Image (tube, grey):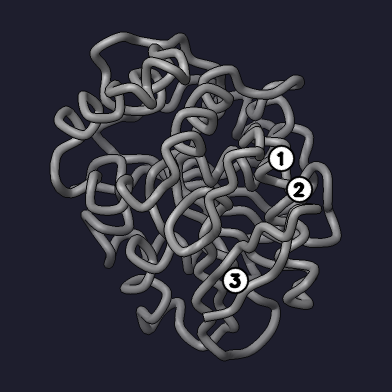
Amino acid sequence: MRNAAVTAEGGQIRWVELPGQEPSRVYVHGLGATSPAYFAEVAVHPLLAGRRSLLIDLLGHGISDRPTDFDYTLESHAEALAAALTSAGVTGAELIAHSMGGSVAIVLAARHPQLVSRLVLVDANLDPIPPAPGATGSSGIAAYSEEEFLAGGWEEIRDRAGSHWWSTMRLAGREALHRSAVHLTRGTVPTMREQLLDLKIPRTYLLPEADSPLPGTDALTEAGVAVVSIPDCGHNIMLDNPEGFARATAAALSDHNQR
């Protein structure tokens, strides 16, 4: 396990690193998740193995620190991730980023282009979404005030999320989980979608076949973003269909797929 201080107060981001060739591949999890659990199987798949790979946990999640004085905006997550990658000597990385992690990866690529050479987004959030009382994901968490969430709202989310997601969600700091969800639903200015459209690096968006078509596909394709549907999976594509995920990701990262 590796680590780097990423805040002025010394908050640590940690990651599991697999040795291999450069350029590095950086795997970034979604809200309430952790990269080692979500990406270990696919990172060592024969189609993806052999690269230096960082299975990194965002601040507030998994094995990273959970500071309560951090605001957990998408921009702050991106800056903390940039600090960790810089500390690790990473440049021109291939980022494979799921859900909220994809939103963070877009902001990272826009703000720190020297750190990112390619982007594979895995069913990532591209647009703001309204809070939704009774929902399970970020919109359900964001429907609580922070005080309500800390006072017991997190238990309602736990019960709605189910044991699989809660197994990693419980590792996140409660302030981190709530603030991350709130800022994910609010999005960024410009939006994550707008920033993605403006990036000049190779970009691929993976989504479950059942959720096709992705809204705004035509504009994404026109801007050079490959939109790829994966069968036999839900939101957690890498867990539900690791073989399909590995094939699509390997294709997205191949040299002939440069744009």
Name the residue: 69% across, 24% down.
Answer: 188
Q: Please state which amino acid type lies under the numbered disc 3.
A: Arg
- Residue 143: x, y in percent? 39, 12
Element type at mark 3: strand
User: Marks 3 and 2, Cα distance to the nearest angstrom?
Assistant: 18 Å
User: Marks 1 and 3, Cα distance to the nearest angstrom?
Assistant: 21 Å
Residue 141 or 12: which is nearer the viewer? Answer: 12
Residue occupied by mark 1: 76
For disc 3, the neighbor class at 10 Å (few under 14, some 14 to 19, many from 20) is: many
Q: Please state which amino acid type lies under the numbered disc 2.
A: Glu
Name the residue: 70% across, 78% down.
Answer: 23
Pair 1/3: label in front: 1
Name the residue: 69% across, 70% down.
Answer: 4
- Residue 35: x, y in percent? 43, 62
- Residue 40: x, y in percent? 36, 72
Pair 3/2: label in front: 2
- Residue 19: x, y in percent? 56, 90
Disc marking residue 159: none
| Quadrant of residue 103 within the rendered picture | top right
Disc marking residue 25: 3
Disc marking residue 79: 2
User: Marks 1 and 2, Cα distance to the nearest angstrom?
Assistant: 5 Å
Note whether 93 is above or below 96 in the view shown: below
